[in-house]
Amino acid sequence: MAGGSRTSRVTITQIAREAGVSTSTVSKVLNGHGDVAQDTRTLVESVMRRNGYHRRPSRQRGALVDVVLNELDSDWSLEIVRGADEVLHAAGMDMVLSVVHGRSEETRQWLDRLAARRSAGVMLVVSELSDRQRERLGAMGVPLVLVDPVGGTTGDIPTVGATNWSGGMAGTNHLIELGHRRIAHIGGPAELNCAQARADGFGTAMQRAGLPVPPDHLSHGEFNERSGYAQAQALLALPEPPTAVFAASDLQALGAFEAMRERGLRAPDDLSVVGFDDLPLARRVSPPLTTVRQPILEMSTLATRTLLRLMDGEPLENPRVELATRLIVRESTRPLG
């Protein structure tokens, strides 16, 4: 590939190969990251100039930004969309919303469409992104931010999340401080980092209080009402059911409410319940739900502003940010007895 001028069809993968560096290093140079050695930056820039590679213009008014979610049927997703829309509207940019339902095939189709429309940036809120998909995104040279990352490592991709572990601790400690000793956890998907962090926070709080967690008091499910209902049904059917439950999401907590109603029970008289998220509906249900507030709107707006900075070539002081969670006490919990 050496020698001669090239068109913009040259990819950053080709640039990386000629320069002898990774595609992520080329992306860092393109996006102005400060953690690239000066000699490496000079080499990459030289290879780009030699091949006539020019980063696409990005911050024109009306430019497109992709926001990609697994689903759009919850208040959580709507808060993410609302935050992104507020920031992009103020910046004079347009949003392309894609829903991939957690399916690899739909993610691949979205990547095809992304390449065709040449969006200026991408905000991803998805449950899984394969190494191959990451590599393809890197090859496109499109600035990228992950919101609430759920997989393992995110490599060089900037992320915005929440303090899930400390949130799990706070929700569980609240129940312990109310005198509860038989406390169960209605957990989220075991493969998701955020769900595991909440479960670990629950376990740490119980361990520090010297309280046992029987195996049948710890379960994993989906972040929805149906799963919370099934998990609560199993708990309430135990010979010695728990007196309190920490649910990994508000929707699962609402499922627990429904399971209780079917048995003629009610929170907090028969079971204290703590959720996680503080969705708008948490204030409207009866009783109003005690929950751990995850700053969803703030996560979305910060991620979108971070994306705009990347598109402007600004370096990031901290590519991994976790916003604080906070316990919100309402009426679904009370002291034992």
Image (spheres, rainbow, N blue to C red):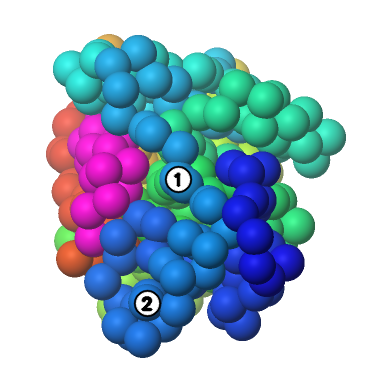
Where residue 179 appears, x then y in whole percent? 23, 60
Q: Residue at 30% across / 60% down in the picture?
A: 32
Quarter-of-image position of residue 42: bottom left
Mark 2 to mark 1: distance in Å? 16 Å
Residue under label 2, please give it: 42
**Of the pair 176 and 325, the residue shown nearer to us:** 325
Residue 26 makes an appearance in the image? yes
Residue under label 1, please give it: 55
* Three-letter code for the amino acid on which mark 1 is drawn: Arg
Where residue 136 appears, x then y in whole percent? 69, 51
Where residue 273 appears, x then y in whole percent? 36, 40
* Range of residues picked out in magenta: 295-315
Q: How many marks?
A: 2
**Of the pair 81 and 97, the residue shown nearer to us:** 97
* Mark 2: secondary structure: helix
Where residue 193 appears, x then y in whole percent? 52, 61
Magenta residue check for 156: no
Q: Is residue 2 left or right of residue 169?
A: right
Q: Badge 2: few (under 14), some or many (20 or more) residues near its Cα, within 10 Å? A: few
Quarter-of-image position of residue 202: bottom left
* Mark 1: secondary structure: loop
In the picture, the quarter occupied by the N terminus is bottom right
**Of the pair 251 and 151, the residue shown nearer to us:** 151
Name the dominant secondary structure of the magenta segment: helix
* Three-letter code for the amino acid on which mark 2 is drawn: Thr
Residue 266 makes an appearance in the image? no
